[in-house]
Amino acid sequence: MTQSNRLITPVLIGGGLILMVSFGARASFGVFQIPISQDLGWLRIEYSLALAIQNLAWGIGQPIFGAIAEKFGNRLALILGGIVYFLGMVLSANSISPEAHQVYGVLIGMGVAGTGFGVIFGMVGRAASDEHRSMALAIATAIGSLGQIIGPPLAGYLLVDLHWSEVFWIFGFIVLASLLVLPMMKTPTPEKQANDEPMGTAIWRSVKDPSFVLIFIGFFSCGYQIGFFTSHFPAMVTELCGPIASDGILASLGVSTTAQLGAWSIGLIGMANIIGTLVAGKLGGKYSKKYLLSSIYFGRVIVCVVFILTPITPATVILFSIMMGMLWLATVPLTSGLIGHIYGVRYMGTLYGLVFFSHQLGGFAGIWLGGALYDSTGGYDLVWWIGIGVGAFSALVHLPIQERPRAVAAA
């Protein structure tokens, strides 16, 4: 496949749109935390476990769908992912037991994997030149972040008049409809080169590299923080935030309750994330990616410490959402770009999928601990401070990475 000298390509646009829908639906699940728990009489841990299992399945499915894309074609992987995602949504909509939601969460997680970063980044990364790769990945991530701006607030508004199960159905059909952009994403399989390695050899060579292990470990905290915030922050804002003024800017936007502010907070994170991701992509093309990643994780630590030590008001929620959003998915183009830089782009989707599994292990821990510690302690303080600790660890673990391409001997 010939790399394009253009930054904006049909593959980038189409891939970004699929990411937008996939991530928009996924980012909305935290908005359902209180409605589902109240409607069905569940403990907080029961719905949290369903979301945690969903994140774990997403992590397991990411390298699987990456391998399917690289073996059998990207569009087949996306079609399978969209169908599985739809089935998980509609089956969950008709389920009333925690166990059923937890089982169907596996389907949703696999569907997110099939329509998510691993498959799309593999396509975008191979289509872009070395010069444009970091920025192309950042733009794809930024377009995907539009889903986070739209999805949670949309879910919040729909829940005013519709049952949560009906909103699940709506989101499921939107996911299926996103596959209509596939005809514009013509990405032939890369031609085999003389020095191509078999996939298994390339994976084994990479996972034995200490730098790959450090990238894998470092991505854990990103998943922990994003998983916790997406699944629990709306509920946290709903329960702990001070009252919203009846004549302020929020009221003029139709935000009159802390529940709606909680939904909007995830959207604000997504909005700020567009700027943060594009800046990270631009910087990643010029400066050391490992140092940028370390700086982002350290920045998250500072923002989280200041927020938890400050009274929670609508103003601090908005400020926190914007600051955290600037650092939200800025790690994604840098991490995937680092993998492409060190190990090449031939199996970039699969290798990123393996690293992303660590991200989802973190997501599982953040979501599950959020529910478990809430039920046992009555609040989110402990799980919040654990997130601060793992964030500081990630800031340090990226520093020893050897950021240089690994040569492959010609066959």
Image (cartoon, rainbow, N blue to C red):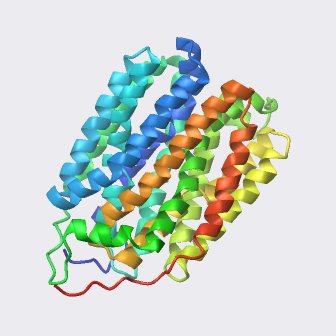
Q: Nearer the viewer, residue 9 or 78?
A: 78
281 left or right of 266? left
> Which residue is at a point 40% across and 31% down the rendered structure image?
105
The answer to whether residue 25 is left or right of residue 407 is right
Percent position of residue 54, x then y: 43, 37
The quadrant of the picture occupied by the N terminus is: bottom left
- Quadrant housing residue 371: top right
Instruction: Residue 349: give x, y in percent of width and height.
Output: 32, 62
The vertical placement of 293 against 264, above or below, is below
Q: Quadrant of the C terminus?
A: bottom left
Q: Is residue 108 left or right of residue 265?
A: left
The part of the image, by quadrant, that contains residue 279 is bottom right
Q: Residue furthest front?
A: 208
Classify 184 as above or below 37.
Answer: below
Along the line of sight, the residue nearer the viewer: 51 or 369: 369
Q: Residue at x 36, y 47 (%)?
A: 60
Res. 257 in view: no
Q: What residue appears at the point 52 percent right and 12 percent down from the top-left corner?
A: 40
Residue drawn at x 42%, y 27% is 102
x, y percent for residue 261: 68, 35
Nearer to me, 204 or 36: 204
